[in-house]
Amino acid sequence: MYPGRNFPPRRPNRRENVNELIRAREVRAVFPDGTAEVMPTAAALRRAQELGLDLVLVAPTAVPPVAKAVDYGHYQYEQKKKQHDAKKKQHVVQVKELKFRPNTDDHDYDFKKNHAIRFLQEGNRVKAVVQFRGREIAHTDLGKKLLMRFAEDLATHGSVEGMPRLEGRNAHILISPTKSGAKAPEKASPPQTPPAHN
């Protein structure tokens, strides 16, 4: 026969904010008809059960705590739905990096500039980086000029955070989106009527 093993007792999945598990002596009970009353928790629980509902603590830090008489399953569903909707509406601002060389040609420059405009319109920040290789490091002024030109070209879509900075073999500048840089809906031009002939 094997000796018994001392495992810690399993904790029940307790709902600390529902019905008999509410520890406060009294609560401000809110009922479906809109009435709110400060009363002992036991009395509020009895009244909720008479209505076929659960007593759920919705504001535990209030004085006294606020409890609502609701269908707990429906309440949980609504809370999860609210959290899901809040996550969907939340926009995470990202930093999009675009890399240049001091001698970047106009075609490549325009291509990256258009990307930057799109990133700013989407509400993201843009980090433009000029990389210097080999002897190019002797011409950091060319890289800074390129970054200042880039910032000027994006002035209607974003605002520059500081001047170009040189770190090691890279110079960079950071541009944040502005509200005015957001996409505006295009207005259809009114049809032109031909001039009347006498």
Image (spheres, rainbow, N blue to C red):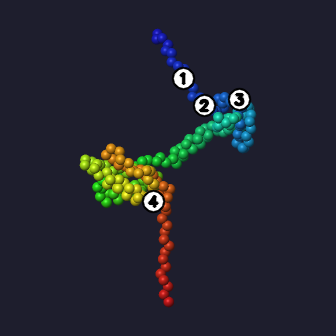
The answer for how far apart the CA atoms under marks 2 and 4 are is 53 Å
**Which residue corresponds to mark 3?**
25
Q: Secondary structure at mark 3?
A: loop
**Which residue corresponds to mark 2?**
15
Vertical arrangement, residue 115 with respect to residue 29, above or below: below
The answer for how far apart the CA atoms under marks 1 and 3 are is 28 Å
- Residue 142 image offset from top left, x and y in percent: 31, 54
Q: Earlier in the sequence, mark 2 or mark 4?
A: 2
Say few, some or many: other residues with alpha carbon within 10 Å of mark 1 (under 14 / 14 to 19 / 20 or more).
few
Please give the count of numbered marks on the rendered protein.
4
Q: Nearer the viewer, mark 1 or mark 3?
A: 3
Q: Nearer the viewer, mark 3 or mark 4?
A: 4
Q: Nearer the viewer, mark 4 or mark 1?
A: 4
Mark 4: which amino acid? Thr
Quadrant housing residue 28: top right
Identified at 51% across, 47% down, the residue is 90
Choose between 131 and 80: the one closer to the eye.
131
